[in-house]
Amino acid sequence: MQRMTRQRTALADLLDGTPDFRSAQQLHQMLKDAGQNVGLATVYRTVQAMAEAGDVDVLRIEDGEALYRRCARGHHHHLVCRECGKTVELAGEAVERWASRIAHEHDFVDVDHTAELVGTCRECATRIYGGGTGA
């Protein structure tokens, strides 16, 4: 367990008030904008430790960058806007049933999984595609 320094407390507080996934660089900039003097390396170390402790969810985007978000509930999945980062938590019962069935069919136990859906929210689609959905 990491000791709660001023910097770690500032980052934890920021994550508590940030509803969408953000990169370590974005979190660092948000802290700077709020007048907090926290180094980028500290942000990286802290979010990684929080992820390992299960205090934040991690989402890897197409280019491999990790995004972080504080989530208070148990196992769940996300629907994330690739443009603005808007995030919706999903229970995903069908995903749970599918994962359980696949594990059983292949004689696996203690199976873990993640399922993240990435798309474009209506607001961003309107901005990008001029009122259409782009589909």
Image (cartoon, grey):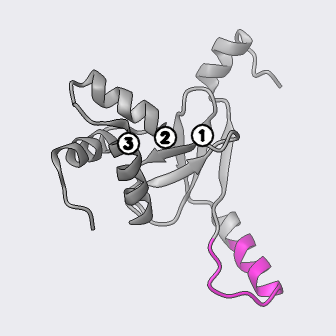
Let me know if residue 49 is in the magenta part.
no
Residue 52 located left or right of residue 2: right
Give the number of the disc on residue 41: 3
**Disc 3 packing (10 Å; few <14; some 14–19; many ≥20):** few
Residue 79 in picture, x, y percent from top left: 61, 44
Amino acid at dot 1: Val
**Figure quadrant of residue 94:** bottom right
Considering every residue shown, the one lying at the far top of the view is 130
Amino acid at dot 2: Phe
Q: Which residue is mark 1?
A: 80
Give the structural element (helix, strand or loop) at label 2. loop
Q: Which residue is mark 2?
A: 21
**Figure quadrant of residue 11:** top left
Of residues 23 and 134, which is closer to you in this image?
23
Q: Which residue is found at the position 65% from the left and 44% from the top?
A: 64
Marks 1 and 3, how far apart in space? Answer: 26 Å
Instruction: State the extent of the magenta-drawn residues as a range.
Output: 97-112
Q: Quadrant of the C terminus?
A: top right
Q: Quadrant of the N terminus?
A: bottom left
Residue 51 in picture, x, y percent from top left: 43, 58
Give the structural element (helix, strand or loop) at label 1. strand
Marks 1 and 2, how far apart in space? Answer: 8 Å
